[in-house]
Image: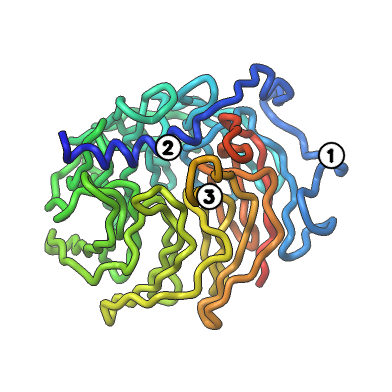
Amino acid sequence: MERKKFSIFCLSLLTLLNMTACNPSRGANSPKSDTFPTSSPKEEFVSGFPGASEGCWSKIAPMYTPRYDFGSEVMDGKIYVFGGKNESGQLSSTEVYDIQSNTWKRLKPMLEARSNFQTAALNGEIYAIGGSQAKFTGMGVTTAAVEKYNPAVNTWVPLRPMRAERMYHQLAVLDGIIYAIGGSADSSVLPAVEAYDPSSDTWTDKTPMSVPRMQFGTAVIGGKIYVIGGCSTEKSLETVEMYDPETDKWTKKAPMQTPRFSFQTEVIEGKIYVMGGLNDKADSLASVEEYDPAADKWTTKRSMKTPRSWFQSTAANGKILAVGGWRKVGDYLSQSFLSSVEEYNPKSDTWTEKLPLLPARSLFKTIHYGDNLFAIGGAVGSNTQAEPGTNSAAMYKMIK
């Protein structure tokens, strides 16, 4: 029982973002037809100057359904979102955003409502794997279910389920195979790894990690999968392991300097950057570290200006953008959703504040497509007052 305490603690932190000031009228102005028209000029810009200027956010058409903890993928100039949760509970609904026309369209719903799951795009199709089916907290009801969406015919089909139920896991795709790694099942944290072959619709058990972990980071470099940090059954982790699919073996690597979970990872020029996250006290972190796989060495980098967890990041043009998230430093009365955005330049080891994303949000998705970054949905609010989901979306013009 003692070994489960920290995993329950990690999971229970997510309930902080479910504190709702219920608003039954939320979403009442959502579009009623199948397609939402382009935003009116008066509402087009969230922050910055009018026009598609570099470094500025512009409001785009909202989704039909407010949601957070959902799945998303981009294919052929369209952004697909599915599942997640809001004040009504778990969602199965699916929508697609056409970047060219700035319109959303409803699609066939998933076969199973879920949140806290993972997705992979492979061979023109989208896979939804695992997740939670609990109504609000994300705890207690995990699933091993797998389904596949085909955009060409707008259908979801069930696939063979994983061998282990899991949520807060990670996926990695290598050579046409999908690897499901770690995660949690109810109050247990998993070391288990399994591989899915789409050509035969089969899952195969692989060598487990040396340490059970959830809410961790991953990176794929040189045909190897790196897993970093996260929560175990007892504490937050600084440990790092590398998986070689050819030998089905894990190799321990140099640990991070700071244990953390619910952080972000990005890869630039063969090096892994980890940013932010939470520590054992559930305080948000601003610290940043760089890992060099060739030297098996971690180096402390300049911290972000704002401590943040449950945020989004993207790497583009040799820089990293950290967007939104959630901050708690000290007691829970100090917690807040974040609108702040900052950009990291690895060459100069500097962070620069950028124009904010409004409204402040966490547990949302960002999609990088072309020269633009799209921020969609999420949990919104300020301090301890939170609404359970937003349907708002915005586009950021990347600085080249």
| Position above or below: 21 against 171 | above
Choose the circle earlier in sequence order: 2 or 1.
2
**Outermost residue toward the right in this view:** 42
Q: Which residue is mark 2?
A: 14
Choose the circle earlier in sequence order: 2 or 3.
2
The answer to whether marks 3 and 1 mark residues whose Cβ atoms lie closer than 8 Å is no
In screen coordinates, is 159 left or right of 121? left
Give, as a three-letter code, the residue at label 2: Leu
Where residue 354 appears, as percent x and y from the top left, is 68, 63
User: What is the number of the mark on residue 129?
Assistant: none
In screen coordinates, is 212 left or right of 351? left
The answer to whether marks 2 and 1 mark residues whose Cβ atoms lie closer than 8 Å is no
Where residue 132 appears, as percent x and y from the top left, is 35, 30
For the residue labelled by badge 1, is the local secondary structure a helix, a strand or a loop?
loop
* Residue 122 makes an appearance in the image: no
The 10 Å Cα crowd at callout 3, few under 14, some 14 to 19, many 20 or more, is many
Q: Which residue is mark 3?
A: 327
Q: Quadrant of the C terminus?
A: bottom right
Instruction: Please state which of residues 335 and 201 is positioned toward the viewer in this rendering.
Output: 335
Q: Which residue is mark 1?
A: 40
Which image quadrant is residue 62 in?
Answer: top right
| Position above or below: 236 against 64 | below
Q: CA distance from mark 2 to mark 3?
A: 13 Å
Q: In front: mark 2 or mark 1?
A: 2
In screen coordinates, is 235 left or right of 357? left
**Outermost residue toward the top in this view:** 24
Q: Residue at x 61, y 38 (%)?
A: 380
Give, as a three-letter code, the residue at label 3: Arg
Q: How many marks?
A: 3
